[in-house]
Image (spheres, rainbow, N blue to C red):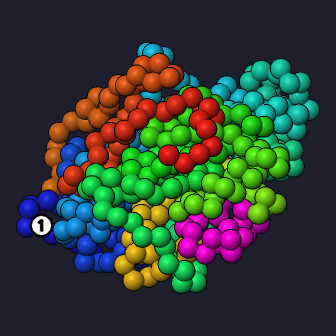
Amino acid sequence: MTDRPTQSGAEPADRPTAEAWAALGGPAELLDRVGFHGPRSVLPSGLPVRRLARATVAACSLAAAELASHRAGGPVPAVRVDEGAVATAFVSERHLAVDGRTPVSFAPHSGFWRTADGWVRTHANYPHHRTRLLAALGLAPDAGPERLGEVLGGLPAEQVQERAYAAGALAVAVAPVSATVHPLMERWVVGSAPARPLGAAPVDRPAAGIRVLDLTRVIAGPVATRTLALLGADVLRIDSPRLPEAEDAHADTGFGKRSTRLDLADLADRATFEGLLATADVVVTGYRPGALDAHGLAADALLARRPELIVAQLCAWGWTGPWAGRRGFDSLVQAGVGIAAHEAAPDGRPGVLPAQALDHGTGYLVAAAVLRALTEQRTGRPGGRHLRFSLAGTASWLLHGIAPEQPSAPSPGTDGEPYDPARWLAEVDSPYGRLRHALPPIGYEGAPTDWARPPGRWGTDAPVWL
């Protein structure tokens, strides 16, 4: 698919946008509705991060516009994605400020470390992960990053990786570019149960009335459900009271949502959860394969109880293979699949993408898939939906599926303006204080420009639907 002018003169959807839209099962004829504008000197990288970012947001915007057309009537609104808004949103956690304080993205024990034979990447942002990492290496719970570096320097990277895995900690050896290709997404129609009817909804709230149970953490899943909340869905995030959450992370991804805590091993809390599930339209999970099965929350178990449900699942390392059941985060997947090696500095130190693009990109794809499923269920394809994503799948697409940027070739329809993220930042009062936050990048005619509500305090909302 080549770029060609549309009637409005905007840039049409490029090949990555078309590939994402096809993976979502979207009608190819709607791609003519998509265009881009804004600064193009964003998210610089040796890999086509800019193309991935704008494609995932464009696909999500088009899915929202498609649902808006169904619920509000009229043609599918034109999609105009601002690349400056996309670049700003893809690093939303870095732009967050709480009463003027800028949160720290990575803890001192997280990062790249030299080993006896290479490099390893650790992730110890959560206190329990730091404790497990130090214990796996025979270190005291209060050992500092300097001592951690000394011990890691004397061990082979793969040994560190496997010792951490056995202890429930997080460390991954920096690997060369992997030849393994994971699917960008997998989707199945399950049965033919009709979804509940939806009435009319305004163009800026195409998901109004949709109830979403959000069982996700960190970035990718919360970005997906934050986007659904932007578009009008009633999103209720549920966490275990035994798993701590970083308040700053929730201040970034909790916009538009509510948040509660339920212990699924407790009979009363489980009954509350089942009551919520009984009238939910969507369940989004972000735990590794099998982690929720003991609670009866495997996709097939959910669809057996609610055959019209949309179940969207995401994980780190893919749904099959020897690493499927391992914990993971964007930074670790970058290390494990070869992105860190690809982006290495001349001195050999591993590099990183200009954003946690696997997280953010996957988040917008998950939201897009849910929106498309909502439309499909009500336009001739009833039945439940099982949707699966992984950070490794998005990484495979970035490494092997998207053509590299061509610096010498102009990008039709975009502007040569300098990038200033301040244009896509806003401030709002919240229970956390005054928040500076990135505005949503979803762009179609009539799209919402900000969330209806700031994030509330994590885990403090009542476990009820609005």
The structure residue drawn at horizontal position 14% and vertical position 59%, both measured from the top left corner, is: 10
**For residue 167, above or below residue 150:** below
Q: Is residue 265 left or right of residue 38?
A: right
Name, please, the residue furthest toward the top.
100
The structure residue drawn at horizontal position 58% and vertical position 53%, both measured from the top left corner, is: 213
- Amino acid type for the residue under numbered disc 1: Pro
Magenta segment: does it hold 320?
A: yes
**For residue 21, above or below residue 413:** below
Question: Label 1: few (<14), some or many (≥20) within 10 Å?
Answer: few
Q: Is residue 376 left or right of residue 31?
A: right
Q: Position of residue 425 (x, y in %)?
A: 32, 31
Tag 1, which secondary structure? loop
| Figure quadrant of residue 375 | bottom left
Name the one closer to the observer, 59 or 435.
435
Which region of the structure is painted magenta?
297-322
Q: Is residue 182 visible?
A: no
The structure residue drawn at horizontal position 53% and vertical position 55%, both measured from the top left corner, is: 212
Residue tagged 1: 5
